Amino acid sequence: MNAILATARPLPTVLQQPVIPATRPIQRRRRSHVGGFRLAPMEVDRFNTFLVSLGRSQAPYDCDQLATAARELCDCSTGIAPIIGFQMRRAAAAALMVGDLAWDADNDARTVASRVVDYVRAGNDLIPDQLPRVGRLDDAIVIETAWPLLSVEVDEYLGYRRLRRIEARLRGCATGDFDFTREQSQQAFRAEAALAAHQRAVREQSYLPAPGSRFQVH
């Protein structure tokens, strides 16, 4: 698994908490603004429906949760919030996979990845992208929601890209100048793993102490 994309960096904890029903007395005023932008309940409902289509099974988000999460991220960050940047790197990897016609992606994973990439690239999503620090918060939520359905496929694709670059260097040409299929990359990966195992075994054998000379009485 690609270590950079696999390392867990959870979104604010308020997004993991169940929604407090509006009828329950609460001690603070419920928030609805992200930066200077007011969240529309109808748009939040539409956002929740989209998340369900990506596999979310938890309770839907409400305006207060999203606004509180955004405020938390703004309080601890001067640039784009690191967790949002992390999720955007995942989105970039998914976008590379979707756009690579040479990669024979799993159909379900490609469909989910395409929907995620389309959302991230859209200009009319839940939170305006141009908002400082947290304009991509909704994108980050979308990516994290879909990642369990994408992680294995994206990881295999990144391995494929790495092996294709190696093959291109060996051939002395660009990566687009030759055919390199998913099956070929899997064969190359197995050969690479076998070579690494052989080299490891050789190193381990070289560290074994030399057998002592046998003592003999003449």
Image (tube, helix red, strand yellow):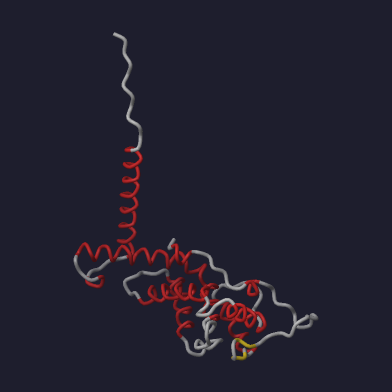
- Residue at 54% x, 68% y is 9
Name, please, the residue furthest toward the right: 25
Q: Quadrant of the C terminus?
A: top left
Q: Answer with left or right where residue 152 lies relative to residue 127.
A: left
- Residue at 45% x, 62% y is 3
Residue 175 coordinates in the image, percent (x, y):
26, 70
Name, please, the residue furthest toward the front: 78
Q: Nearer the viewer, residue 7 or 144?
A: 7
Q: Give the image quarter of residue 15.
A: bottom right
Name, please, the residue furthest toward the left: 172
Q: Give the image quarter of residue 217.
A: top left
Q: Is the residue 204 above or below the residue 115 in the image?
A: above
Residue 44 coordinates in the image, percent (x, y):
61, 85
The number of numbered discs placed on residues in the rendered structure image is: 0
Name, please, the residue furthest toward the top: 218
Residue 171 coordinates in the image, percent (x, y):
20, 64
- Residue at 42% x, 73% y is 94
Q: Answer with left or right where residue 78 lies relative to residue 206.
A: right
Residue 132 coordinates in the image, percent (x, y):
52, 85
Q: Nearer the viewer, residue 47 or 17?
A: 17
Q: Quadrant of the N terminus?
A: bottom left
